[in-house]
Image (cartoon, coloured by chain):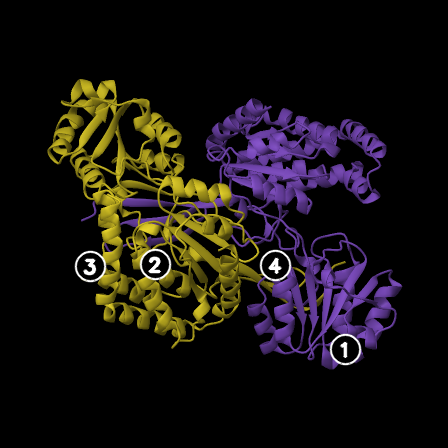
Chain colours: A yellow, B purple
C-alpha cells in the first residue's frame, strides 16, 4: 500500500512538470473530450454507482448521505457540464501579476504558475472526482484523488472513463491518479509525501479534516464548517431582512453557506422577530433563541451555549438579540467559522464597520450568505470553500490552484 | 508554561482584531518611535547581548553562530533603519485587488486584510526580533515571537524596549508577545493553538523547521534551505557567466541565495571551466566535480551523490557538466530546493524554456542568484524566503503578511 501510494505520487510529480507546459488549447480539448465520454458512458457509471448504493443500504447510511451518493442521468450531465465549464474559463497559468524594474536594471516579473501536485481527499459525493480533475488539470496541475469508501465503485468508474480519454490527448495520463484503497492508512502515507505533493485539500466532515491537518507534512487548505450569521441591524429594511434570512436558512439548509445563527438588534427585535420566527417555523425550521428572543417570539426553545458554534446543516436556527453592531461583530468573530456572514442595514457607515470588523472569508451587505460558491462568484466551479486564511480564502478555484514565481531578467548583474 | 502560552495567544488574538483597524499613519508613528528607542537604548541592548555572548563562549558555540549573535552599535542602527523602512513602505492593508459585478447585481470586492496572529520561531540573530515586529505590525498583524535560547537576553532586551514604546502609541500593547521560555515545549504548545494563531513562520536550521512542520496544526510557511544553481548554457557569454558564478558563490557564501551547484553545458565546458575553477580556488573555494569536470579542470575533488542536494553555506561548490538545457532543468528540479536558480545565455528562446521549466521561487536569466532578498526586490525587508509554494513564494514581506477577503454589496439578493 505504502509503496503504491509513493509510486503514484512520484508519477504524478513527473507528470506535473509536463502539465505545466501543456498549452491552454490542448487542455481545453481534453476537458471537452472527458465531458463527452462521461455522457457516453452514463449507463456504465450509473450501474457502478448502484453497487455503492446497495452497500450503503446494507450499512444503513443516513438518507442525506445516500442522497449525496446517488448518480442519475441528470447528475452525470452536471458533471459533464462542469468539465465543459472548466474548459471555458480563462486559463490563469502564465498571467503576469506584476512587473517591476529595480534601480540596478533587473526586471522582475511575477507570474502565475501551476502548484504542481494537488492531493484531494474527499467523502461521499462522486461528482467531486470529475470536478476536481477538471479544475486541477485546467490549472496545469497533476492531481491525486482519494475518495471515500462509500463511493468506491462510482469513483473508480468515473476515474477510469476520464483516464481512458487522456490517452488520446496532450495531457500525460499520469496527471490523474486515484488511490483505490478503502482505508485511511493510504491517506496517512500520502500526507507524508511532502517532497512529491505540494498541496492537500480535504473535503468532508470535520473528523476527516482534523485527521488530515494533524497528519500532514504537506500544506493543507482546510474547508471546515460554515457557521454563517446574518445580523439584522437597527437600521435594516426589515422586509428585505426577512427575505434574506429566510433564503439563507431554508433555500438549502444542508450546505456550508446556509445561515446557522441570526443576530438581531434589540431595537428591532420586537418588530422583526415574531413574524420572522413564525415564517421559519411554518417552513419546518426549529428555532432556538436567547432569553430576549423567547420573550418576543412564540415556540422558541432555549438556545444553549453549544448552539452558537454548531453547524446544524439542517432546519435548525439559533437566534440572539444583541445590544449593538459591535456586539454582533464580536459574537461572529468569537463563535463563527470565518466562512460567510451578512449584515442587513441601510446605513453605509455601519455596513463598512461590519465589513471591516468581521474576520470572515466573505462578508455581505444586504444579501443572502448562500452566494458563497465558486459558480456564483463566476469562478466556474470550486474545489471547496476555504475557511483558512493562508493561500486561499473563500471559494477556491483556478487562481487558487495556482501559485506564482518570479522571473528575473538581467544583463550580467552581480551583487556588491 | 502551557497556560502562559495560551494566555499570550489569547491576548494576541484580541489585539489582532484591534490592529486590523489601526490607521497607516498611527502604525508608522509607532514604528518610527520604536526605531528611536532602539538607538537611545543602544548601550543597554549591547550590555544585555554581552550576557548571551558570555554564555555562548562557555558553550563553545561556533564562530559563525557567535558572529550572528553579536549586537554592536552598527547592528543596532541597522535594526532601527529596518523599522524606519517598514514605516516608509506602502501599507498593503485595504488594497482592492479586484472588483467584479455579477449578473444578479452583486458587487464583489476582493481586498487585502491582515492575517491576524503570526507566530515567528527563530534562532540566533537577535535583529529578527525587531525586524519581524516591524513587518508584522505594519501589515496590521499581532505577532508572537519565540527566539532561540542562545539569544535569550538580547531578545528580552529588544522586546522590552519595543513594548515600552507601544504604551505611548495607537497600537495595542498586546500586539507583540515574546515567549521567554528557553525550551521547545513552549513551541509545541504554541503550534497547537490553531484557534488563536493564523500563521507560523519558522526561521532557522533544517532541524527546527522539520520540528515545526511536524508539530503544527497551524499553517506553516517554510523557509528551508537554498540549494541554488547557475547553469552556463552553450550559448552563454562566458565572460559574463564567470562574473555571475563567481559572485553567486563567493560574495557571501553563508547565505541561502548563494550558489551551491554550477551546471555547465558540455560544449563550453573545456573553454569555461579551467579558468573559472582556478579563480574560485584562488578565492578559497573547494570545488567538487563530476568526472567530466575533473577531466578539464585542475584540483577538483570527485563529487559524491550527496553533493547535489547539499546546502554548503560555505566556500564549497559542486560542478556538473550536462548534455543539454533539458538535463540542466531536470537536475535542478530533482536536486534543488526551489529557491533561486539562474541560466546564463544569449538565447532568448532558451532563456524562456529555462524560466518556464525550472520549478523555483525565483528564476534568473543573466544575473546572480544573490538578488533573492526582500530588500533587493524593493520590499523593504523580509520575514524570510519561502521555499513553499502555498501562500508565499520567495521573499516574504508585507503583502505576504496579508491575506484577502471578499466584501459583497447587495440590494436584497437571495438565491433561487
Disc 3 marks which residue?
A: A72
Q: Position of residue B405 (x, y in %)?
A: 40, 45
Judged from the image, the secondary structure of the residue bearing numbered disc 1 is helix
For label 4, the SS is: loop
Is the C-beta separation of discs 4 and 3 under 8 Å?
A: no
Mark-to-mark CA distance, 2 and 4: 30 Å
Question: Which mark, by number, is residue A11?
Answer: none
The dot on residue A129 is 2
Chain bearing tag 3 is A
Q: In the visual, does B356 lie left or right of A351?
A: right
Are the residues under marks 2 and 4 on the same chain? no
**Mark 2 or 1, closer to the camera:** 2
> Where is B174 relative to A75, above or below?
above
Left or right of B80 on screen, residue A141: left
Residue B379 appears at what percent x and percent y? Answer: 60, 50
Q: Which residue is the extreme one toward the left?
A: A282
Q: Secondary structure at mark 2?
A: helix
Mark 4 on the same chain as mark 1: yes
Amino acid at each position: 500500500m505504502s509503496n503504491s501510494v509513493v509510486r503514484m505520487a512520484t508519477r504524478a510529480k513527473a507528470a506535473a512538470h509536463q502539465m505545466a507546459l501543456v498549452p491552454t488549447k490542448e487542455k481545453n480539448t481534453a476537458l471537452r473530450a472527458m465531458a463527452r465520454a462521461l455522457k457516453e458512458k452514463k449507463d456504465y457509471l450509473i450501474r457502478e454507482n448502484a453497487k455503492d448504493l446497495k452497500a450503503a443500504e446494507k450499512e444503513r447510511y443516513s438518507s442525506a448521505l445516500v442522497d449525496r451518493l446517488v448518480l442519475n442521468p441528470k447528475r452525470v450531465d452536471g458533471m459533464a457540464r462542469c468539465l465543459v465549464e472548466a474548459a471555458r474559463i480563462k486559463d490563469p497559468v502564465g498571467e503576469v501579476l506584476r512587473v517591476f524594474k529595480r534601480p540596478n536594471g533587473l526586471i522582475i516579473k511575477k507570474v502565475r504558475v501551476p502548484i504542481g501536485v494537488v492531493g484531494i481527499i474527499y467523502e461521499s459525493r462522486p461528482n467531486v472526482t470529475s470536478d476536481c480533475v477538471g479544475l486541477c488539470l485546467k490549472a496545469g496541475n497533476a492531481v491525486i484523488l482519494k475518495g471515500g469508501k462509500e463511493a468506491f465503485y462510482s469513483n473508480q468508474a468515473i476515474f477510469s472513463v476520464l483516464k481512458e480519454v487522456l490517452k488520446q490527448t496532450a495531457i500525460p495520463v499520469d496527471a490523474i491518479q486515484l488511490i483505490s484503497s478503502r482505508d485511511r492508512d493510504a491517506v496517512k502515507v500520502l500526507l507524508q509525501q511532502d517532497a512529491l505533493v505540494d498541496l492537500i485539500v480535504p473535503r468532508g466532515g470535520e473528523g476527516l479534516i482534523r485527521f488530515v491537518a494533524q497528519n500532514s507534512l504537506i500544506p493543507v487548505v482546510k474547508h471546515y464548517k460554515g457557521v454563517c450569521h446574518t445580523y439584522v441591524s437597527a437600521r435594516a429594511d426589515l422586509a428585505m431582512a426577512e427575505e434574506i434570512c429566510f433564503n439563507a436558512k431554508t433555500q438549502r439548509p444542508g450546505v456550508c453557506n446556509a445561515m446557522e445563527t441570526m443576530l438581531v438588534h434589540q431595537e428591532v427585535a420586537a418588530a422583526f422577530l415574531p413574524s420572522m420566527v413564525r415564517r421559519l417555523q411554518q417552513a419546518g425550521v426549529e428555532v432556538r433563541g436567547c432569553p430576549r428572543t423567547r420573550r418576543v417570539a412564540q415556540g422558541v426553545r432555549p438556545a444553549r451555549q453549544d448552539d452558537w458554534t454548531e453547524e446544524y446543516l439542517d432546519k435548525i436556527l439559533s437566534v440572539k438579540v444583541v445590544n449593538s453592531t459591535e456586539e454582533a461583530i464580536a459574537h461572529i468573530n468569537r463563535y463563527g467559522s470565518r466562512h460567510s456572514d451578512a449584515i442587513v442595514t441601510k446605513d453605509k457607515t455601519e455596513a463598512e464597520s461590519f465589513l471591516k470588523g468581521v474576520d470572515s472569508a466573505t462578508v455581505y451587505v444586504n444579501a443572502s450568505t448562500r452566494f458563497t460558491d465558486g459558480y456564483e462568484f463566476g469562478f466556474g466551479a470550486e474545489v471547496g470553500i476555504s475557511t483558512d486564511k493562508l493561500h486561499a480564502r473563500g471559494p477556491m478555484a483556478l487562481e487558487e490552484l495556482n501559485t506564482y514565481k518570479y522571473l528575473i531578467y538581467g544583463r550580467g548583474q552581480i551583487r556588491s
